[in-house]
Amino acid sequence: PVQNGLNLRSPICCIMGHVDAGKTKLLDCIRGTRVQEGEAGGITQQIGATYFPAENIRERTKELKANAKLNVPGLLVIDTPGHKSFTNLRSRGSSLCDIAVLVVDIMHGLEPQTIESLNFLKKGNTNFVIALNKVDRLYGWKTCRNAPIGKAIGQQSKDVMMEFNTRLTQIITQFKEQGLNTELYYKNKEMGDTYNIVPTSAISGEGIPDLLLLLVQWAPKTMIKRLTCSEKLQCTVLEVKVVEGHGTTIDVVLVNGMLHEGDRIVVCGMQGPVVTSIRALLTPHPMRELRVKGTYLHHKEIKVVQGIKIAAQGLQHAIAGTSLYVVGPNDDIEYIKESAMDD
Ligand code: GTP
Ligand code: MG
Ligand code: NA
């Protein structure tokens, strides 16, 4: 994917926030899926991954007339649970991403896991945008399906705007209490020092074009070096799970490097390093969630940022959150096993 002389990989973007802020629903809105409705109790309990090709993002943002020249092939989005018992999954997601979206329910403001997520992002020095979600719940909100937020706000009554501004001001103050300057993205003149807020609705889609454009345009601009493709394998295990017809599989995120069917791999295991060979390299279709059972695409090799399901023998002891290693012809396997166990 060489564009403009740059050879950038897709950024990895983590969605974080308090339970029920609308993280999964936002992704459903972008994908055109109904993953959230299928979740037990409407609660996300696993890390997910969805790949959005640049052409889909371009399509979704064209109303902004940004002339969106995208310098990245796409965006890999990691969904995380907001429930308080999944702190480890939020930590795993945030440690793996290049950028993040912190989702805040406009009716609730900052909540305990919003703040916890914020602290993970601060700790990792991760740049993020704030999606101020559920604007459609403002009393009297007039739906402007999938419209850029500026256009949608232009259609609202004085009363709606008053409620919007009151809530926005409160939330900006709450962020200030956490030591962060925040501002509506289209008023923000200090990009970088002041974090961007994008009002959104995951139900009617207002603000989604703005959110996507911010993610794909601004991420590459601020992290060219980090996003420059490298040959060195960088691959993290997200989840370990049994899948009918494939036995125990691991869901991984490939950040850099290449994986092939048949590759000899090493991952950290509960009873020592797991050494095995990739039997199948599977991905969901673009714009589909890795954690949802569906049809998988089989690959001989993968060399771009992707959420991948790997089937291989012996994976039942693998530990999520650790790195995956490939044993090359000249590699010292004992050294790799040690590295894997150090994770
Ligand atoms: P966890 O993953 O469990 O932390 O929740 P989540 O942040 O993924 O929220 P989820 O997508 O499960 O949405 C929670 C509830 O809020 C669901 O009932 C959604 O339909 C509703 N919801 C999400 N976004 C919006 C929105 O923009 N507007 C309105 N009105 N409801 C929303
Ligand atoms: Mg969710
Ligand atoms: Na939920």
Image (cartoon, rainbow, N blue to C red):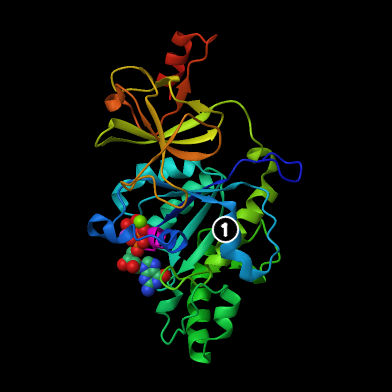
Q: Residues within 10 Å of mark 1 (few under 14, many from 20)?
A: some
Answer left or right for 295 relative to 224.
left
- Towards the viewer: 229 or 3: 3
Report the quarter where the C terminus lies.
top left
Q: Which residue is mark 1?
A: 57
* Percent of width and height locating residue 317: 28, 25
Answer left or right for 112 relative to 130.
left
- Towards the viewer: 69 or 23: 69
Answer left or right for 229 relative to 15.
right
Disc 1 residue type?
Ile
Main secondary structure along the magenta-highlighted residues:
loop
Q: From the viewer's perspective, is residue 199 above or below residue 43?
A: below
What range is drawn magenta here? Answer: 18-25
* Percent of width and height locating residue 301: 50, 29
Residue 310 location, quadrant: top left
Residue 197 can be seen, yes or no: no
Q: From the viewer's perspective, is residue 156 above or below residue 111?
A: below
Residue at image coords 44%, 9%: 334
Q: From the viewer's perspective, is residue 82 above or below residue 234?
A: below
Residue 35 can be seen, yes or no: yes
- Towards the viewer: 51 or 200: 51
Image region (quadrant) for ligand 2: bottom left
Kindly state the secondary structure of the residue where label 1 is placed. Answer: helix
Mark 1 beta carbon near ligand 1 (under 8 Å): no
Residue 278 location, quadrant: top left
Q: Is residue 19 magenta?
A: yes
- Towards the viewer: 63 or 27: 63
